Amino acid sequence: MGALLSMLRGGGSGSSSGGGQSGGLTRLSRDTYPPARFSKQFNEFICNLGDARNAEYVEANFPEGSMVVRAGSELLERVGGYQDGTSEVRAAITQRTPESEEAAWRKIGPSVSLLRECFELAQGVERIVPGILDELCSHGGDEGPGRTDRNRGLARLLADLMQNAFEFDALKASIPAIQNDFSYYRRTLARIANCQEAEIAQYSMPQDVSNQMSLFYAHHNPMVRTVVDSATRFARDSSNGPAVLDCLAALAAGSLSTIKRKRAGGAASEQTCVLVLVTCCVLYDWIAPQGICGAQSGIDAKAVLAVVGGRPVVGTTAADKVLRANCLTLR
């Protein structure tokens, strides 16, 4: 079955069967194991995730994915410098005059435009995720020379999208004004649209867009929810859907093995493996009927937490906190 399947069953890299070993740190699966085709597919995943050929594959085959990741990184910097309109909004509410309202609109207008850009980015992420999963799940038996670059490239792309999602949601949680500013904007949207000053009217948007944005920002983790909801729909509706959980479990196994055996090829590559592992765990937890903590889970949450729980994922926030904040069943 290959080295990865052996590891999934609890044996070492040179073992041909599960043997009697049942230690939690070497056993990523419990009662179900990813099919051999995924073990073979990700057997070489333990190699360097930072290899330039991985990025070249993504650029050539998923250019939209690369663009969304870059756009997400740029937006994160801008959201980090968010200019809130707390004072102006408070004044417009407590002492409403045409002047105080216009001052509030001028202040929050650029911020709301930024929030709309983030929402549109989320829509781009939503479109990309099914294609990544479909590509990963469609080539389980592929032994072509480019499979390693493809698998690493797609795994890293998925992890980069989730990294941006984690960071965006952390920023949103740290800036209460985002919700407050947008709430005031929605309440006064009709007056903004009818404002005679072009500088203010330019910040108007269709009502249906503001409604969708309101639903998006109502979540405590809106960008992560975008990723997991898109993945969940793919797993439910696609012909490749049934293979998604097996694929995620095998990716998680390859990542965990790489980290434990220190075979990532460098600190940056190892950190990417941590992120891939966390990403797989979050997606698996949302898609699997019983979650990552269920008896039939293909990923052992305790093993993951034991190995990477203290590793930073978002800034200084450790993997265990990120997992508990974004998983359904891991608390």
Image (cartoon, rainbow, N blue to C red):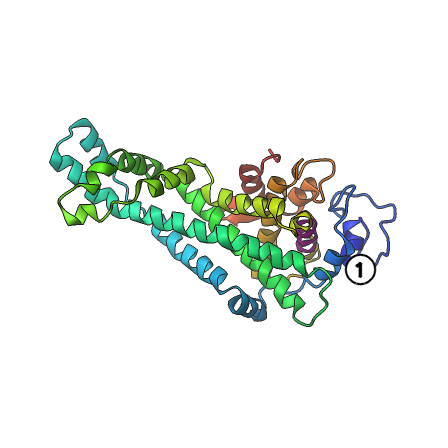
Question: Nearest the camera: 167 or 242?
Answer: 242
Where residue 232 sits, quadrant-wise, is: top right
Residue 120 position, x and y percent, is 39, 50
Residue 114 position, x and y percent, is 32, 49
Confirm whether residue 177 shows in the render: yes
* Majority secondary structure in the magenta region: helix
Where residue 94 sits, quadrant-wise, is: top left
Q: Is residue 145 magenta?
A: no
- Give the position of the C terminus as an image quadrant: top right
Q: Which region of the structure is painted magenta? A: 246-255
- Give the position of the N terminus as an image quadrant: bottom right
Question: Nearest the camera: 143 or 28?
Answer: 143
189 in relation to 42, above or below:
above
| Three-letter code for the amino acid on which mark 1 is drawn | Gly
Residue 197 position, x and y percent, is 13, 46
Where residue 189 sits, quadrant-wise, is: top left
Query: Which residue occupies 54% across, 40% down?
Result: 326
Confirm whether residue 309 shows in the render: no
Question: Nearest the camera: 13 or 129?
Answer: 129
Q: How many marks?
A: 1
Q: What SS does tag 1 mark?
A: loop
Q: Could you classify mark 1 by the number of other residues whose Cα lies within 10 Å: few (under 14), some (14-19), or many (20 or more)? A: some
Residue 227 position, x and y percent, is 52, 47
Q: Is residue 253 magenta?
A: yes
Give the residue pinned by disc 1.
2
Farthest residue toward the bottom?
Answer: 145
Query: Which residue occupies 40% across, 41% down?
Result: 172
Does 179 sit left or right of 297 as displayed? left
94 in relation to 262, above or below:
above
Query: Which residue occupies 62% across, 67% down?
Result: 149
